[in-house]
Image (spheres, rainbow, N blue to C red):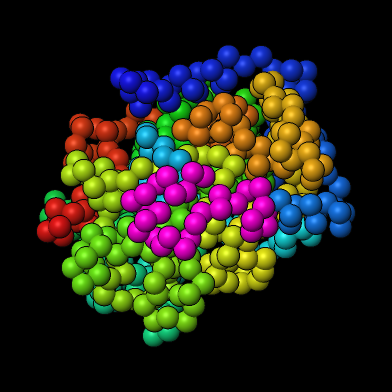
Amino acid sequence: MGNLTRRGFLGGVAGAGAVTLAPSPAAAQVAAADTAATSPRFFGRMFPGLPPFAENTPRVQDALRAMGAPGGPLDAKDPLHEGPVRLITNPELSPGNLDNPFNTAGTTFVGQFIDHDFTFDLHSRLAVPAVPEQSPNTRNPTLSLDSVYGGGPVLSPQLYDSGDRAKFRVENGGLFEDLPRRADGVAIIGDPRNDENLMISGLHAAFLLFHNRIVDRLRAAGVPADRIFADAQRTVVWHYQWIVVHEFLPQIIGFGLTQDILAHGRRFYRPAEGQHFMPVEFQGACYRFGHSQVRPSYRANLKGDNGQPFFGFVFDPAAEGQSDPVDLRGGRRARRRFIGWQTFFDFGDGQVRPNKRIDTHISTPLFRLPLGAIADGSPPVSLPQRNLLRHLTWSLPSGQAVARAMGIPVLDSVPELREFGFDRSTPLWYYTLREAETLGDGITLAGASARLIGEVFVGLLQLDPESYLRQQPQWKPTLPSRVGGQFGMVDLLKFARVDPASRGQ
C-alpha cells in the first residue's frame, strides 16, 4: 500500500459510503418513527418495521446449519495438522487468514471484552423466536464496566480484596497475575465469559490491576478515603470509554465515519432519554463480525513455556480435561498461562503480530468450541452455526433490507449463498462480513453495518448520564500516555504494569 497511512486509509474507507448518505423513502420513514421504545434492561430493535430475512422453517434451519458447518463455505479450512506455530510463522499455509496491516492481534480481544461489558443474553434459545423487548439484557448497555465492577464492593464483595475494599482481588499461580479463582478453577469475576480464553482473561486481569494502581495514585494524592473507590472507578471507566471512541471505533469502522457520527449525529439509533437499549441487529448479527478476526492460533507469551514461547490454538479438542491445556482456553491456572502483551499490542519492540482481516472466512477451531466456552453449555459447538441460528431467534432482517432502509448502497446479490437460498436475502451477520470484505478490503467494516455499529457505540455513550461524552464531551485523559492526551491500550497496559518492560521481558 505504499506510503498510505493507517488514518488516511481508514478515513478514506469510511468516507466512501458513510458520510454522504442519501436516505431512501424507507430510511426517512424509519428515521421519522425513531427507534422503538424499550429500556436498558431489555433488548430492542433498530428497524422494527423490517420483515425477517427468512421464515423460520426446518428447511431454513437446515440451510443455516449447512452454511455454518465445519468444512462449509465459512470454514477457512486451516491446515490444523501443521500445528499452532507453523500457522503463525508460515501464513501461506492458511490463505483464508489474511493479515490486516492496520490492526494488531489485540483488537479482536478488546472487541470481545467490550461486548461482554454491554450485552449478555442468558434467556433466549437458538432458533426459538423471542421478543427482544421482553428479553432481558443481563449487562448494563452503557460501557460502564459492570462486567468488571459487578455491583461494587457492597453488592459484589467476592470480587474485592477483603483487606482493602477499594481494590480488586488479583491472584497468581503462574509466572504473573491471574484472575481470582475457586478451587475448581472457575474465575471469580463479574462476567464468566471473561474467562473463555487466555487472552480475554488476561485483559480482565489487566483492568483489575489498572483500577488498583489508580487507587494507589489517588491515595498518594491525598483523596479522602470515602471518595477513593468512586473516583478510581470513574477514572478507569472514562479512560476506557476514551479508548473505545478514539482508538477502537476508528480501528473497526474507520476514522472518517467515527468523526462523522460524533460531529453530525446519529440517524438510525435514536432511543428516547432513558431508553438506551441494546439492539438485536447489533447484538445478534453485526457486532459478531469480531469472530472473523480470530486467528487459529496465537503466541500467548515469549518465555512462559520453560523459557520458550507458548504457542497454542485458540481451542483444541486434544486439550479437553487437561490441567494445563495445550490450547488457549480459559478456566485453568498454570505457570505458562499468562499473556505477553507484546504479541497483541505495539510496544515498539518489533514483536507485535497483525490482526486477521474481516471477511467471510472463519478460523477452523471456531467450528469446534469446547462447551465451557458456550454461555449456556449447550450445542451446537460451531460458532458460525450459532450466529446464524440466532437470526431466527430475533427474526432479524436481511442485510439488504437494512442497507436499503439506511439509504446505503446495497449488495443486491451474494452469489455464493445461492445454493442455500440466501443470495438476495442474506443473514445480517454474513452480510456484515461480506460488506467488510467487498467494500472495506477486510481492513474495516463498511456500508450499513459500519454505520449501525458506530451509531450504537456513540449513542450508548451519549445517552448514559455518567459517561464522559455526556458529562464532559471535551474531557481528555489524565493518565500518562505516549502521545499527549491520546491514551490507548498500550498506555493502559503500561499503567497497569503488565507490559513487557514492567515484567522484564
Relative side of 135 to 57, left or right: left
Q: Find residue 380 and report its horizontal and vertical position in percent.
A: 67, 65
Relative side of 254 to 23, left or right: left
Asked if residue 434 is positioned above or below residue 502 in the image, the reply reads above
Is residue 53 visible in the rendered image? The answer is no
Asked if residue 202 is positioned above or below residue 360 in the image, the reply reads below
Q: Quadrant of residue 129?
A: bottom right
Q: Find residue 505 and report its horizontal and vertical position in percent.
A: 15, 57
* Front residue of this view, candidates 284 and 500: 500
Asked if residue 300 is positioned above or below residue 7 in the image, the reply reads below
Residue at 24% from the left image edge and 32% from the top image edge: 485
- The magenta-colored residue range is 68-96
* Front residue of this view, candidates 138 and 345: 345
Q: Find residue 58 and report its horizontal and vertical position in percent.
A: 86, 57
* Front residue of this view, candidates 243 and 293: 293
Q: Quadrant of residue 410?
A: top right
Residue at 52% from the left image edge and 45% from the top image edge: 96
Relative side of 216 to 93, left or right: left
